[in-house]
Image: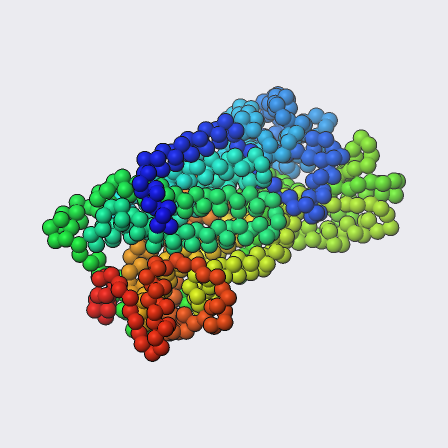
């Protein structure tokens, strides 16, 4: 690490130029290529996936995205001539729009039954595109919205719903990112007192995240990448990027105050703290790449995209940042600090004030404080037991959105199930199959939970048919999921008995249920693999059995508590409307996997930065109480500052207005807050005081065969090796004045 830092410091202008060229080049390539995201939740081999594929093969065009135009009048009827004169021409114009395969209107002979409500005040038409929503350009979706809205008049409300229409409601601009960066800049300035020093972490993070964002755009052309992946990558990248740079800048400033030259201080910061940064980044990437175990193309792209962002932020922290530190010179210190250094010379930076007092307090009351932290985490984690994975549909959108208003109009006029009909698709092979399928609508109509059933529609070849089942509950309701199971397990098998008929149950709810089932089935393997790999890394780094086991337990606690907060806010609806995130609803099926990956990685960060300082002190002195006290006193301030920055960045993404991104933002902010202010400052040091020397125990046989990953400075390892050669004698290697005086200051 020292050699890397030395090269980039000596060639600082070249280093900055290379990063700028990479940013410009990647950005230009992304603009030229354009985006190609895909929210394909279909899992190969599931029944809903087979239904979609069969429908697409048998009915060209019907496998495309289906959207809805809804109109409502408060006076009279939608069948009135005045209403028809406005709506009918609009529907004809919509049918001629590019990409539209068909329009089914309630007016005319091709109308499907039930497209006008019983009170006659609400009607809807279905618009079927030739492509799925992911492949529909936003300008075509916008043309549909503008054309339909043109028919709106006094007394006639026109709203639209569907996946393609939702493309027009995606938030634009980067307000959330700007707010997060601004708050981070303020916190950094308050922490450093130097404008130049506070801007460096921001600049480093922005450059690396900018390159990563462009890389994710390009990645979408070679693999499945969800449309929220760039925002997620930016969210994670800004958080960890600013934090990693903060730790290195803090170490650099400490070196300057000790009298080191600018180049030497930067090199030392990268050679010491930079090791922990690389190690922490590796743990985050391992947690993210753990999603590849699930072998789901939808999550593979998210994992690689987020990992790319973390890799680039780590690379910028250990290459671009030292170059920038050497460029600003002594301005990394505030004017007051530079003046004091000139007048009084190098002074030890002692961990005084609240940090030292708190560290001593934890040492005196480990049982009480550990119990308090445990109770807090347990209470916050309780809502996790009511976690419901399912479809967070357009009924959860903000009340002002046209998709939400269309959803509500349909639910009021036709019942909640019309917003998420189930599609039963059958492959026919002979007259017996046709007869059996013709009897199916009667059995479906008599099934509990079914509101209505459409007639069977056959394709021209006569080998494929489909019918639509409207549940009497909303798409996100558990009752609808139970209906899907009932159809698949009882009704459909009965109809297929004695024939070669194959009927597959598809639709939005069925697709999400299948996706959730696959994820939940693989979740134990995924979590186990992520925890095991994280523990292995910590085992190699800290040469201890206890440290990895405690880290795993702390990470699980942070994830569980964060999930509890997400459930309370988004599933129970505690404040979602106030935040502009719509109404309460279930949690998206893919969120647990992605959140577990990110949260495990971020939780490991603070574990590494806290325990690595304790480990240094342990290697130097062999005194566990001193190691825990000094480590907590010296790192708590910078960890808390980093946590405040990361929390601010994550919460700012709630302003994006995107429900999924807001879930990520709140979950990550909650996890970081609990991790920094409850686990790392309360529970972890309390447990380490209680366990004593057992914290650092490792069987000698295991120690001999394990490869060594050094995140500690070389002099710490020398001290430990020297002490090991002199049994019963404590040998303390030379340490800085700060750590020598901590004992007196902290208690």
User: Residue drawn at (76%, 54%), measured in percent from left and top?
Assistant: 490
Where 388 sits versus 746, above or below? above
Q: Is residue 743 left or right of residue 368?
A: left
Viewer-closest of 373 and 305: 305
User: Residue drawn at (43%, 51%), measured in percent from left and top?
Assistant: 281
User: Residue drawn at (37%, 62%), measured in percent from left and top?
Assistant: 611
Report x, y in % for residue 268. Answer: 30, 52
Report x, y in % for residue 742. Answer: 24, 66
User: Residue drawn at (52%, 34%), measured in percent from left and top?
Assistant: 218
Q: Can residue 360 be seen in the rendering of this structure? A: yes
Viewer-closest of 2 and 686: 2
Q: Can residue 572 be seen in the rendering of this structure? A: no
Q: Is residue 316 left or right of residue 355?
A: right
Report x, y in % for residue 207. Answer: 38, 38
Colour treatment of the image: rainbow
Quadrant the C terminus occupies = bottom left
The quadrant holding residue 686 is bottom left
Report x, y in % for residue 743. Answer: 24, 69
Q: Is residue 245 left or right of residue 342?
A: right
Looking at this rendering, what residue extends furthest in the right direction?
A: 431
């Amino acid at each position: 690490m020292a050699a890397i830092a030395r090269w980039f410091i000596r060639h600082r202008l070249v280093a900055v130029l290379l990063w700028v060229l990479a940013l410009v080049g990647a950005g230009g390539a992304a603009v030229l290529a354009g985006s190609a995201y895909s929210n394909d939740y279909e899992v190969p081999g599931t029944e809903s996936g087979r239904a979609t594929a069969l429908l697409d093969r048998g009915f060209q065009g019907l496998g495309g995205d289906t959207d809805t135009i809804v109109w409502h009048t408060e006076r009279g009827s939608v069948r009135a001539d005045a209403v028809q004169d406005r709506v009918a021409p609009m529907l004809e114009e919509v049918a001629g729009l590019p990409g539209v395969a068909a329009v089914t209107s309630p007016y005319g002979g091709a109308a499907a039954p039930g497209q006008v409500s019983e009170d006659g005040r609400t009607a809807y038409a279905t618009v079927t595109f030739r492509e799925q929503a992911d492949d529909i350009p936003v300008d075509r979706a916008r043309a549909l919205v503008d054309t339909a809205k043109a028919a709106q008049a006094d007394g006639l409300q026109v709203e639209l719903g569907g996946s393609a229409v939702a493309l027009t409601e995606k938030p634009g601009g980067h307000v959330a990112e700007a707010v997060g960066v601004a708050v981070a800049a303020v916190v950094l300035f308050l922490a450093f007192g130097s404008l130049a020093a506070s801007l460096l972490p921001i600049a480093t993070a922005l450059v690396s995240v900018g390159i990563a964002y462009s890389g994710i755009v390009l990645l979408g052309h070679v693999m499945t990448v969800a449309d929220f992946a760039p925002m997620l990558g930016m969210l994670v990248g800004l958080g960890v990027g600013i934090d990693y740079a903060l730790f290195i800048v803090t170490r650099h400033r400490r070196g300057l105050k000790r009298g080191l030259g600018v180049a030497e201080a930067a090199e030392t910061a990268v050679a010491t703290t930079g090791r922990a940064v690389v190690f922490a980044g590796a743990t985050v990437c391992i947690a993210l790449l753990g999603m590849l175990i699930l072998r789901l193309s939808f999550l593979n792209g998210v994992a690689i995209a987020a990992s790319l962002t973390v890799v680039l932020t780590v690379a910028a922290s250990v290459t671009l940042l030292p170059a920038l530190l050497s460029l600003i010179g002594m301005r990394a210190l505030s004017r007051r600090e530079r003046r004091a250094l000139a007048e009084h010379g190098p002074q030890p930076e002692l961990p005084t004030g609240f940090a030292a007092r708190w560290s001593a307090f934890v040492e005196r009351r480990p049982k009480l404080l550990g119990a308090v932290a445990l109770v807090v985490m347990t209470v916050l984690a309780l809502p996790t037991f009511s976690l419901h994975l399912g479809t967070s549909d357009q009924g959860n959108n903000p009340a002002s959105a046209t998709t939400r208003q269309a959803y509500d109009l349909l639910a009021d006029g036709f019942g909640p199930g019309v917003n998420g009909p189930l599609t039963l698709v059958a492959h026919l092979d002979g007259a017996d199959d046709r007869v059996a399928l013709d009897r199916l609508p009667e059995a479906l109509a008599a099934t509990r939970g079914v509101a209505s059933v459409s007639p069977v529609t056959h394709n021209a070849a006569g080998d494929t048919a489909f019918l639509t089942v409207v549940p009497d509950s909303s798409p996100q309701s558990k009752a609808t999921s139970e209906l899907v199971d009932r159809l698949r397990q009882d009704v459909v098998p009965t109809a297929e008995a004695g024939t070669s008929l194959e009927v597959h149950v598809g639709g939005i709810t069925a697709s999400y249920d299948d996706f959730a089932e696959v994820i939940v089935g693989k979740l134990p393997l995924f979590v186990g693999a992520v925890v095991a790999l994280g523990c292995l890394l910590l085992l190699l780094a800290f040469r201890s059995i206890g440290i990895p086991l405690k880290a795993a337990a702390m990470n699980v606690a942070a994830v569980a508590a964060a999930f509890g907060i997400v459930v309370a806010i988004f599933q129970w609806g505690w404040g979602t409307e106030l935040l502009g995130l719509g109404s309460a609803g279930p949690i998206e099926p893919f969120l647990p996997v992605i959140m577990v990956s990110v949260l495990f990685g971020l939780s490991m960060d603070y574990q590494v930065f806290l325990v690595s300082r304790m480990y240094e002190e342990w290697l130097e002195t062999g005194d566990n109480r001193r190691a825990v006290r000094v480590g907590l006193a010296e790192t708590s301030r910078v960890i808390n500052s980093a946590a405040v920055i990361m929390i601010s960045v994550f919460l700012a993404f709630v302003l994006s207005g995107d429900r999924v991104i807001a879930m990520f933002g709140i979950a990550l902010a909650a996890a970081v807050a609990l991790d920094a202010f409850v686990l790392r400052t309360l529970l972890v040091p309390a447990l380490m005081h209680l366990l004593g020397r057992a914290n650092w125990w490792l069987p000698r046989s295991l120690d001999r065969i394990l490869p060594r990953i050094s995140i500690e400075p070389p002099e710490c390892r020398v001290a430990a090796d020297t002490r090991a050669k002199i049994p019963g004698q404590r040998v303390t290697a030379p340490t800085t004045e700060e750590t020598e005086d901590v004992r007196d200051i902290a208690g």
